[in-house]
Image (spheres, rainbow, N blue to C red):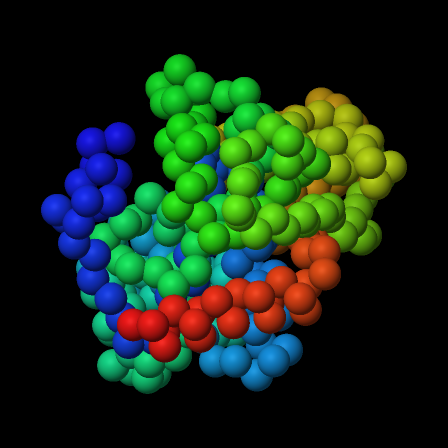
Amino acid sequence: RARNALYDRAIWRTRRLHGAVVSVGNLSAGGSGKTPFVMLLGELLKARAIKFDVLSRGFGRRSKGVRLVDPAGLPQEFGDEPLLIARKLQVPVIVGEDRCEAGRFAEGKFGPQLHLLDDGFQHRALARDFDIVLVTPQDATDNLLPAGRLREPLHSLRRADAVVLASGASAESFPLEGKIVWRVRRGIVAKDVPLRPVVFCGIARPQNFVLQLRTANIEPVAEAFYRDHHAYCEKDIRELLKLKRRSEAGGFVTTEKDAVNLGGFLSALEPLAVVPVKMELSDADNAVDTMLHKISDRKREA
């Protein structure tokens, strides 16, 4: 609260990039679908031939400073989610603890194009031209860290331009007066999943993934869950193969993020189905129009 108050009163000042900044963030510590939404929004921008880059902290990487993500690189260098975004969108992704410095690096290399700020709601040091916040049903009744998963209280949504209702969240559960409200549907694209699979993943809310599998009529015979952003090692692979033998499973199923973190261990777990998340935005064209018009208006006012 003290930190937000310092920014709200302009005692701590934000820095601005030449290109417009669109932040995608949330209130809770992971699991709301920020990365799938960044990729969805990126695809919508690409369909309009709008050039953009993605700025990310690069959570979990061992490197420091500003780095341009190499899609052929490793999660230890860039973080698993920035690497996944770079591979899926095929646009520049820049990681850096200081997102303003990352943006300046991007503008020096690619020009002042639009910037998508991944997980940016709490990164107030960088001024943004449009703030998108995803909320889930759990956020409405959750507690602040460490008692719950919320990074900020619900009234922080007053800083948002658009609030995205994810995972069936209800508008009535949040203070949304005067806000643009978008709705997304999130599912999976399950193809060539082995019979009787072992499901494993290192994501924020693994039970949601299991539920999505069951909704797609895939019933895992065993489960193995790891911490979010888990970096797999040889010991993990041995234990997963033992679990497969014990449960007489036909193979494995996991997420795209976990496939990034498996790296060279992927082939050791065959047959393995990597299941992508599919996110759809209701009335997507109108939503993007609204966002672009709002950005244009703010640029003129500035």
Identify the residue at image location x=64%, y=31%: 172
Q: In front here: 115 or 92?
A: 115
Q: Is residue 192 visible?
A: yes
- Give the quadrant of the N terminus: top left
Counting from the top left corner in percent of width and height, residue 141 is at 54, 20
Q: How many marks?
A: 0
User: Is 127 placed above or below 186 here?
Assistant: below
- Give the quadrant of the C terminus: bottom left
Quarter of image, res 242: top right
Identify the residue at image location x=20%, y=62%: 15
Counting from the top left corner in percent of width and height, residue 297 is at 43, 72
Left or right side of 154 for 281? right
Counting from the top left corner in percent of width and height, residue 263 is at 49, 54
Left or right side of 298 for 167? right
Q: In front here: 222 or 150?
A: 150
Outermost residue on the left side: it is 11
Left or right side of 286 for 111? left
Identify the residue at image location x=76%, y=52%: 189
Outermost residue on the top side: it is 147
Left or right side of 244 for 67? left
